Image (cartoon, rainbow, N blue to C red):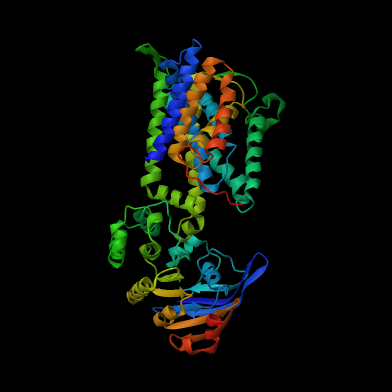
Amino acid sequence: MLKVEDLEIYYHQIRALTGISFEVDKGEICALLGANGAGKTTTLRAISGLLKPFRGRILFMDREITSLPPHEIVRKGIIHVPEGRGVFEELTVLENLELGGYLVKERETIKKNLSHVYELFPVLYERRRQLAGTLSGGEQQMLAIGRGLLAHPRLLLLDEPSLGLSPILVKRISQTIKRINEEGVTILLVEQNIHMAVELTHRGYLLETGSLLLEGEGRELLKNEKVKEAYLG
Amino acid sequence: MSRRRLNHLLFIALLITGLSFYVSSFGLIVSSQQIINGIQKGSMYALIALGYTMVYGIIRLINFAHGDIFMIGVYLSCFTGELLIKRGISGAFLLSMLVAISGCVLLGVAIERVAYRPLRDKPRLTMLITALGVSLFLGNFLSLSPHQLPFPLKYLVFGPEFRSFPILIEEKTYEIWGVILNNIKLINLGIALLLMIVLEYIVKYTLLGKAMRATAFNKEVALLMGIDINRIITFTFALGAGLAGVAGIMYGTTYGVLQSPYLGLWPGIVAFVAAVLGGIGNIPGAMVGGFLMGTIETIATSINSSLGYGVTFLVLILVLLIKPQGLLGKPTVEKA
């Protein structure tokens, strides 16, 4: 579904990615693992068009999307839920969700997606008139994911959905991610919390300082020495 | 409205009352007439201030060319009005306003495209200096004398001389409780209030308005929502410039004279101070600030005809010293 070929990216003068290639298959949850600074977020930002690659190609459903502006990429069905949640704190919960469906023209679809999101996260319905900035960290994460769902994604890029959440919330979020996936959304997950990641994912890639180290199946990854090294030092 | 905001408004109200008592002790009376005049002038400042504040909100730029966009609105409505009256076409007021609005919108959008967009990723100071340059260019270029210029250019300039604004609406005066009102001022005030309500509706309730606020809050996340932020920025400039165009015809109908193409400078500065007073980036703040500045300037001018200028800058200095975030703005930490 998504194919990244030989992606090389510079941040100013510094090479953040040294030419990585990987694939995400339709229907799976795929993880990008790695320590801080390995280039995971950079990879997501390149896929969603926020960063222009220096070299390499990104293909989505066999069409090249490398040089497209972010809003065109959203239109194709790739939705990026950014790290640190990135909700619009000065807008209400409902306004945040509506903006998630910015490119969806049909009112009916928006209504349907909205009630689906409310069903997944009932707390968002209760707080729909509140400013997003008044939500707790966990609720903001739910809002960020819910907002992503409003655009009717085919591929959801999730950047550190467990960041700063309590273990109970992490469990709830990961159950929801699983459910979203079962409903037919392909997911590319970037995660520091390796236990959460391997529980969820079918397949994962390990990144280290800008290059791809290895590929493995969910739980298998945990046994790998390199993975242990990357996460436990 | 929160209690703190209410307190600030009360504070300002007290300040004005105090000032008027002080003034009246000198034997001069701040009459309700001056307040009415101030509100009318203030509605014009508020319309201009909205353009400053919206543009600042979305790209953090003080668009110094905004006063000159307003000036072009004055001239465009003047020329259109003259032409229509000469031809005897009715509805000159509304048609001139439409021409002023469209001309200003096109110019505002063009300035953003040509002068600001290429500099968006550069340090903010670069764009600010460019804005000053655009402002100086417009004022000076349009002040050139047509007969000194070669063929195509001579039709583009306004010339430096005085012009009188055509009479678009027959003036009628009314007296209510000793206050003299005229229909032109009332029409202008009504239009200004109506536009402010429409603007508030657009920003608050339409998807485009929500996208504007989202883009102002966080551009990168706005991009991830599929918002084409270039379109939103263009739309913001168009809105601001259109309001300046309306302020332009208000200026013409109220004062009746066009001094020179530098005439946008002073209203531009007052409106900028109004935007800062209300809290730059804050839309209701610009409206409140505009009305306050109009009133303050009118009262100061009535004491001494050249006091208005000084008091405007005094307000700016006081706001920056005491409450730099403005009356309705939130305190923020300036990032480098």
Task: Give coordinates of residue A165: x percent, y percent.
Answer: 41, 69
Q: Residue B190's image quarter?
A: top left
Q: Residue A163's image quarter?
A: bottom left
Task: Give coordinates of residue B280: x percent, y percent.
Answer: 51, 40
Depth order, front residue of A186/A5 = A186
| In-image side of A86 versus A124 (left or right) | right
| In-image side of B76 versus B140 (left or right) | left
Task: Give coordinates of residue B157: x percent, y percent.
Answer: 63, 29
- Rendered view: B40 above or below A44: above
Residue B168 visible in rendering:
no
Q: Residue A176's image quarter?
A: bottom left
Task: Give coordinates of residue A142: x percent, y percent.
Answer: 37, 65
Depth order, front residue of A179/A37 = A37
Q: Residue at x 45, y 59 (%)?
A: B226
Depth order, front residue of B86/B323 = B323
In this rendering, the count of numbered labels is 0
Q: Residue at x 54, y 71 (%)?
A: A43
Q: Quadrant of the N terminus of chain B?
A: top left
Residue B42 visible in rendering:
yes
- Rendered view: B18 above or below A2: above
